[in-house]
Amino acid sequence: MTLRPISPRVVVVLLLTLGLVGSLTRPAAAADWTLAPADTTFGSGRQAFRYTLNPGGTLEDAVAVFNTGAAPLDVTLRAADGVPGLELAQAAVTVPAGETAEVPFTLTLPQDAEAGDRVGGIVAAGGGSEATAAINLRVGGPLTPSLVVEDVRMEYSGGDATVEYTLRNTGNAILSAQPTVSVSGPFGRWKAAAGKLPDSPAVLPGKTWKGSARVPDVTPAVRLSATVELLPLITDEAGSVSPLKPVQATGHAFAIPWLLVLALLVVVGVVVAVARRRPARARVSSVQHLG
């Protein structure tokens, strides 16, 4: 599969999920400054850094701090985890009021860097606030998108079933998934579905996401089977989404049909009572006949 840059919308979701983002190209609360990619040969007006780089490759770019306040601003900068080989030219900068400071950086991948997607950022702190400029990187090489469904669990209560499961990204590309959840009885009978469910968020390679779904109108058929099917979705740089081969897993639970059990007990009780009365009547009839 051809390697392409990751969609910036995917990067924003991932950074929010990972807790790396204090502010993405917007001022942090009560701060008169912003952080964003500088205008360089990579482009102008960028919302995030986006690169495709082969193992051993090097690139140079810059991040910009915009001070819109009325006083000088002291800012410290650091590389967030997720993208290897990122070196900032400066760890701190003072930005005069109403001006912009650009801090160059170099990104150098090791020769043995593994192919696939990485997400990180440059974090800046100043004036009591923090902001992050997102970096998404796709390392050149074979792209092997893959995910699995794990740990399917089910709880049954009052005619409804709650199904929980774990999505694990086992490949090297960022993926989301479209889930389908259903519950059935023995031999696939009395199948009930959860209906249309929202797609999962984008999940980084090696990471997991826990999902759940409520399935209504489930028949308590003693032994129930919950099936979770995930349709993996990969997004290219243009925002186009392509589906991959679906994967699925099954979990089981027991649901006793108590009304049916009660009805059977009543029937059995009636049968036993009738059976006991018949011998008694037969003995009375025999005694009367002998008399």
Image: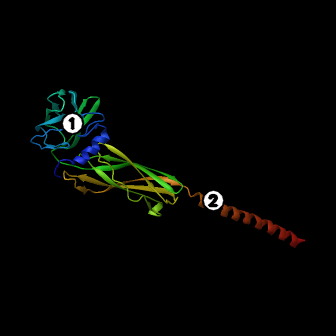
Q: Is residue 153 left or right of residue 172?
A: right
Quarter of the figure with residue 289: bottom right
The amino acid on which the numbered mark 1 sits, given as a three-letter code, is Leu
Which numbered disc covers residue 35?
Answer: 1
Image color mode: rainbow
| Quarter holding residue 66 | top left
Residue 110 visible in the snapshot: no
The number of numbered discs placed on residues in the rendered structure image is 2
Answer with mark 2 or mark 1, whichever residue precedes in sequence. 1
Q: Can residue 261 be seen in this view?
A: yes
> SS for tag 1?
strand
* Nearer to me, 21 or 32: 32
> Residue 162, how many percent across, how many down?
46, 52
Give the residue at mark 2: 262
Labels 2, 1: front one = 1
The quarter in which the C terminus is drawn is bottom right
Label 2 secondary element: helix
Q: In this view, does 22 lie to the left or right of 188?
A: left
In the rendered image, residue 79, in percent from the top left (x then y), is placed at 21, 32
Q: Measure the alpha-carbon separation of dots 2 and 1.
A: 68 Å
Amino acid type at circle 2 is Leu
Residue positioned 30% across, 39% down in the render:
18
Q: Is residue 155 depicted above or below 40 in this figure? A: below
For disc 1, the neighbor class at 10 Å (few under 14, some 14 to 19, many from 20) is many
Q: Position of residue 224 (x, y in %)?
A: 48, 56
Q: Work out whether residue 65 or residue 289 is closer to the camera in this orientation and state it.
A: 65
